[in-house]
Image (cartoon, helix red, strand yellow):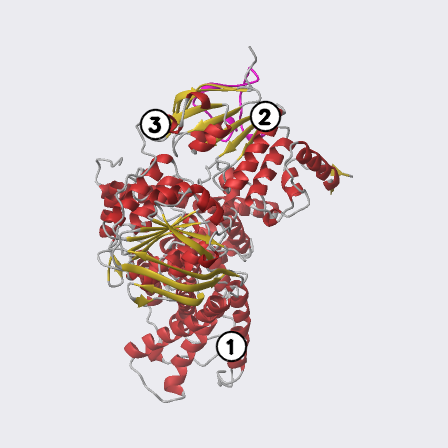
Amino acid sequence: MAQSSESPFARRALNLVRLGFNELTVPVLAVVTALVVGGLVMLVAGGDPLLAYLGLWEGAFGDAKAISETFVWATPYIFAGLAVALAFKGGLFNIGAEGQLAMGAVVAAWIGYALPGVLKIELPAFIHIPLAVLGGAFAGGIWGAIPGWLKAKTGAHEVINTIMMNYIILLIASFLLNGPMKDPNPLNVIARTPSIAESARVPRLLPDLRVHWGFVFALGVVVLVWWLLYKTTVGFEIRTVGTNPNAGQYAGMNVAWITVLTMGLSGALAGLAGTIEVTALNYRHELSFSLGYGFDAITVALLGKTHPVGVALAAILMGAMRNGATRMQFLTQVPVDIVSVIQSLILLFVAADVIVRFLFRIRTPKQGDAMMTRGWS
Amino acid sequence: METNALELKAITKRFPGVLANDRVDFQLRKGEIHALLGENGAGKTTLMNIVYGLYHQDAGEILVNGAPVAIRDPNDAIRRGIGMVHQHFMLIPVFTVAENIILGTETVRHGVVLDRQTASARIRALSHQYGLDVNPDLLVHDLPVGVQQRVEIVKALYRQADVLILDEPTAVLTPQEAGDLFRIMRELTGRGVSIIFITHKLKEVLEIADRITTLRAGRVVGTVTPAETDEHKLAAMMVGREVILTVEKQPAQPAAEVLRVEHLRVLDERKVPVVNDASFTVRAGEVLGIAGVQGNGQTELVEALTGLRAATGGKITLLDQAVTNQPPRPIIERGVAHVPEDRHKHGLVLPFPISDNLVLCTYYQTPFARGWQMDYAAIDANARERIRDFDVRTPSPFIPVESLSGGNQQKVIVAREFSRPIKLLILNQPTRGLDVGSIEYIHRRVIEWRDRGCAVLLVSAELDEILSLADRIAVIYKGRILETLNAVDATREQLGLLMAGVTQTPAAQ
């Protein structure tokens, strides 16, 4: 009953717009609040917040080079943010993105340098690049699927296991990069692999800028993840099991398999974050390359409301702040670390959205619709 | 004339698109039990939430002890002596009874130390005074539902409430517990507490209320006393038309056997055998009712039949094929529909739109999916059709199913499960917590499917439901089927004895 006379399509579209607007309110206000509080911190420390934010803006979007660097920074955030967001959709908290991207980076680097360099297998770029990228993604996927499998089989909580998996791979990577995979160049003193072959390098978009096809690929993966989650039967299963596993079982879904699959896909996305840094930017794996992308990804995913498009926007914002910070410090002597402060504040305000809702007098939605993960027990 | 403990004058409350309360007048006399009766969505809970300060009326006046008051929030309500026990309890499971009760009104010693002793002593005194039998030192999650409810009542009394609002208090109780509650309610009114009792169960209203006010579509239909009314009149007031309380049906015409259960054994979570050597059959075109007091293995029995729980022994045969310990999907695909006992746990994905919930079991089949890709046009069309056919009251097929009333949520499940080519219908407590109109509707649909040649297995703790729907009745007690009777021969007394485990013929074991 109560069918309206408007076309159902228009009604649904209207609903989506309204929903989108509501969904955006808290993240946008969280960012605004974080910037204001960050500005107060600068004031207290004797800086000029307006000048600092001007510098931040110039550094991030001031010219073509700045924009290019922002996109370069954003790329790993997009992949890792998608990884965490997809796991959230499946009711799982993947804190292991950092380890999964390290796994991806190690494998991609090996495929990149060792196939031609050690095994003497020469490949054309159109095979070598996909092989390195997909190899890294696959490795990250395995690294994510293991805690997924442990959860499905034994009920062991994925938070604990992904953290432990982080330590395992970071130590293994440290061993490999200081040992068997270390760059043998006599001038090299740090833990890094040899350069990957030209045939494994993802090309740049424009001649003089560092922004690369990996960024475009990342945007493509955003669409792919959106399609997977909202348009396919597998996505329906992931979201159902993530929201109510009992109903998933009742509906005949294989809950254990979906859990493993979700963590595997999440790990593969995180693996891509490491892989693209190796094949499109650094052209080698250096132990210190990841500045905690896997952990910042949690902020990105939450700020993006775990929606793929939101994640992309949040990742670009995060990349812009990281990138613009240098210019800001140059202009105002406000240290780049203020960006970490702002980022933490964003996470705080997004996670504890009660604060933002109170500050801006936004009415709380009726029910707890933002359930991210299932409980501990 | 004595002043009323609570009086509402022309309360009006409008929500976007709905007039939830329309000039509602209501008087609560001191020391009376005043039942507020109405279907789901009639505006009972909205009205009480206004009294309790959770909503604000758009127009109208609230008088407490004859004086007009403004109630801004629940604290205001509590200050004025109004207490509310919600349908879903507001208790913290890992806290003790005393901690839950003092939460928000804690008293401290030396500025920091929580004064548990004084609180416990006061709770004991209150509990003793009103015959509530609540131990302040137990953890809430160890308590049965009926006792948790008493904790909520003590909580209100602890805050010195003399007007108590009980929102659907019996929905979660066994008949035994409901009896206890009614005794407590009498005790309370005897000591000057006034009670508003929200419900849609007609028998209870006639049993316990002093006066009955019926709401329909936000308006007061009338206020009566139990002496001047009966179930039929009340039902008609609630629904607005004559309601058929008994289901009209022809004698069953059982055909081929659809389900055969032999010597089934099932364990519960604690590895205790809860289904013990159960055997029965269901044939096409008949309704087999499983009668029994809650917790005699019905839940686990149904879960084993639908593939949600492993059987440790015995055999389940569905349409001449063994399906023991098969996963749910092949069982569903062989033509089993299941209306689960707990619709929030198993039956629905609450934050998902109604349209998605309507394809929960068939999302991967044509026309809802082509290969990997879901076809949302087909899913939307399906939703519109089901909502119309099954009279689900909703402004849109795309709102989250959790925003529907309980009765409409159940209709969504029924609409989904009854819309496949099914051979066996398994219903577990299909009308629990529903209003008269929805119950009548669901009962009619069940008989309709029986007459189309579907086998129906009905598990219910409501004897009335079993008696009005079932063609044969199997009584379950401690996981065993004690006896199977023809419904026409069965009497209430006989079933009651069997449900308590008393058999006349030892051979039936």
Determine contact: label 1, label 3, CB under 8 Å: no
What span is in magenta? B51-80
Q: Quadrant of residue A109?
A: bottom left
Instruction: Please tell me whether mark 1 or mark 2 is closer to you in this view.
Output: 2
Q: Is residue B56 magenta?
A: yes
Along the viewing direction, whichever of A283 and B375 lies nearer the viewer: B375
Q: Which residue is mark 3?
A: B236
The residue lying toward the viewer, choosing from A71 and A57, is A71
Tag 3: residue type?
A: Ala
* Residue displayed at 51% across by 38% down: A358
Residue sitting at 51 percent across and 81 percent down? A176
Q: Chain of mark 2?
A: B
For residue A173, the mark is: 1
Kindly report which numbered mark, 1 or 3, lies closer to the viewer in this rendering.
Answer: 3
For mark 1, name the chain: A
Q: Would residue B49 be visible to someone looking at this image? A: no
